[in-house]
């Protein structure tokens, strides 16, 4: 296992992540000379030991996992990074021309208003792993993986016995997801994903034909990687694959996060109205 | 810098640095608040709204006319506040006391609404409580 890991992409990515430089957070905060007391540099965790295993011999992904390298939540932006784009670059989404044109026409405010999160909707699949700054807890037993997301207090149960998809699944934020093992990698395959979810925060919408494949690996005790491939023949010209994204083991209990005081939709709608009004005024002035 | 060894003598610390890759929040403060309209506020803490996705705290600030404006400041999520060392109790214990806030105004023109970047309570400690709008970096 160790020999295999040494040559793996995950190993290289992990090496680079563990060696990130001093954070920008060490610099002045918000233009003030005084350094905030909670602007602490994140400390990356070492491997911590070998990969734990389930009774059936497969890797055990159980644990509370935080994005980035520290095993905790931090204001240190460098410590929250999940991959090094120099080592494992991610290509832009390969949009079909009509989809690219639709997204190009959006403004920054449109991006905000379209986010599932701004609307207090679940981030769904794959947002819960690609767009989730909060910890998740995995509870792994032979035959199933349970993912508990602190964000919006939602969860999913992934059977890992290699079963087939439901032949007629209802669309949902979590979709219809099934898992299978490829060596020490758990491959989670999801279809029937609710079209209200986006794959990024800049307008990457998807169709009812979206197909998401997540690959979970745990190279050691403290580190978990999740790599995502997205196929969408109605929106993309070819599949898109993420870098292996790093999560690091923490020891905190998940907390409550219900979205009950959401003021953004109202405020951003007012901003959109203001921008639209200013655009009309500009056009009118130009045409005179 | 610490070095870790995983595999039979192979030094795995390579020393490459990360490029800026945004970490995503509930929403971007920089999209809703104006990075060119950030300023210092000194006033009296009057209360909090301790709910997700963002906390809000309220501060009475004297205006140029001699009156008082009641400002609302948005913070990061409660879980982020708590994990970074700022609790509900920190606010409650300081209601009625003087505070300093670095904040950025709402782009939509809403009056007396701003995103808080940093806050100084009467203990004199400056603390991060919001996203850093001025430099465009997102924090939860």
Image (tube, coloured by chain):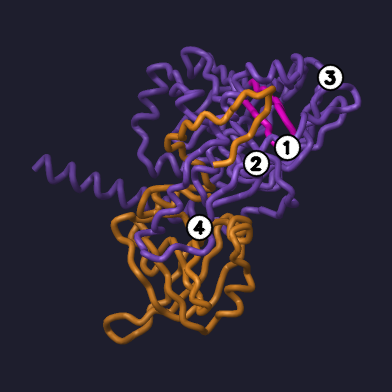
Q: Are marks 3 and 4 in contact (CB under 8 Å)?
A: no
Question: Looking at the colours in the rendered structure, which chain would you say is drawn in orange?
Answer: B
**Residue A1 position in % (x across, y down):** 75, 18
Q: Please, which chain is the residue tagged with disc 2 on?
A: A
**Residue A98 position in % (x across, y down):** 39, 19
Residue to which mark 4 is pinned: A39
Task: Tell me which label, 3 or 4, sits earlier in the chain.
Answer: 4
The reply to the same-chain question for discs 3 and 2 is yes
Report the front residue among A217 and A95: A217
Element assignment for label 1 = loop
* Prevailing secondary structure class for the magenta stretch in the rendered image: strand
Residue to which mark 1 is pinned: A48
As drawn, the residue found furthest toward the right would be A55
Residue to which mark 2 is pinned: A45
The reply to the same-chain question for discs 3 and 4 is yes
Element assignment for label 2 = loop
**How many angstroms separate mark 2 from mark 1 (CA)?**
8 Å
Task: Tell me which label, 1 or 3, sits earlier in the chain.
Answer: 1
Residue A260 showing in the rendered view: no
Q: Are marks 2 and 1 in contact (CB under 8 Å)?
A: yes
**Residue A64 position in % (x across, y down):** 73, 43
Residue mark closest to the camera, 4 vs 1: 1
Residue B6 showing in the rendered view: yes
Q: Which residues are magenta?
A: A213-227
**How many angstroms separate mark 3 from mark 4 (CA)?**
44 Å
Element assignment for label 4 = loop
Q: Residue at x 76, y 40 (%)?
A: A63
In the picture, measured across the screen, residue A229 lies left or right of residue A59, that is: left
């Amino acid at each position: 296992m160790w020999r295999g890991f040494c040559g793996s992409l995950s190993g290289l990515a992990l090496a680079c992540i563990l060696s990130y430089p001093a954070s920008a957070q060490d610099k002045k905060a918000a233009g003030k000379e005084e350094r905030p007391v909670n602007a602490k540099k994140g400390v990356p965790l070492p491997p911590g030991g070998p990969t734990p295993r389930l009774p059936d011999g497969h890797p055990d992904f159980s644990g509370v996992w935080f994005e980035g390298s520290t095993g905790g939540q931090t204001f240190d932006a460098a410590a929250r990074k999940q991959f090094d784009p120099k080592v494992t670059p991610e290509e832009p989404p390969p949009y079909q021309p009509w989809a690219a044109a639709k997204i190009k026409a959006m403004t920054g405010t449109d991006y905000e208003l379209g986010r599932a999160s701004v609307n207090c909707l679940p981030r769904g699949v794959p947002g819960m792993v690609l767009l989730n700054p909060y910890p998740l807890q995995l509870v792994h037993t032979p035959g199933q993986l349970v993912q508990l997301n602190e964000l919006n207090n939602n969860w999913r149960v992934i059977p890992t016995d290699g079963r087939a998809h439901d032949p007629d699944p209802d669309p949902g934020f979590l979709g219809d997801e099934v898992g299978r093992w490829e060596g020490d990698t758990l491959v989670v395959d999801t279809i029937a994903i609710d079209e209200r979810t986006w794959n990024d925060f800049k307008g990457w919408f998807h169709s009812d034909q979206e197909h998401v494949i997540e690959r979970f690996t745990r190279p050691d005790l403290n580190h978990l990687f999740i790599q995502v491939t997205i196929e969408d023949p109605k929106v993309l010209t070819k599949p898109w694959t993420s870098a292996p994204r790093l999560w690091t083991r923490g020891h905190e209990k998940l907390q409550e996060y219900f979205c009950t005081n959401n003021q953004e939709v109202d405020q951003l709608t007012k901003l959109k109205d203001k921008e639209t009004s200013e655009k009309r005024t500009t056009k009118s002035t130009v045409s005179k | 810098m610490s070095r870790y060894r995983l595999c039979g003598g192979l030094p795995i610390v390579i020393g490459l640095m990360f490029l800026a890759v945004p970490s995503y929040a509930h929403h971007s403060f920089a999209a809703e608040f104006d990075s060119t309209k950030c300023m210092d506020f000194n006033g009296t803490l009057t209360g909090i709204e301790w709910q997700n996705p963002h906390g809000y705290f309220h501060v009475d600030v004297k205006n140029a006319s001699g009156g008082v404006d009641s400002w609302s400041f948005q913070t990061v999520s409660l879980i982020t506040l708590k994990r970074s060392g700022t609790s509900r109790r920190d606010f409650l214990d300081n209601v009625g006391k003087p505070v300093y806030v670095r904040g950025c105004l709402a782009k939509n023109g809403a009056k007396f609404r701003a995103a808080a970047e940093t806050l100084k309570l009467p203990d004199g400690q400056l603390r991060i409580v919001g996203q850093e709008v001025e430099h465009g970096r997102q924090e939860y």
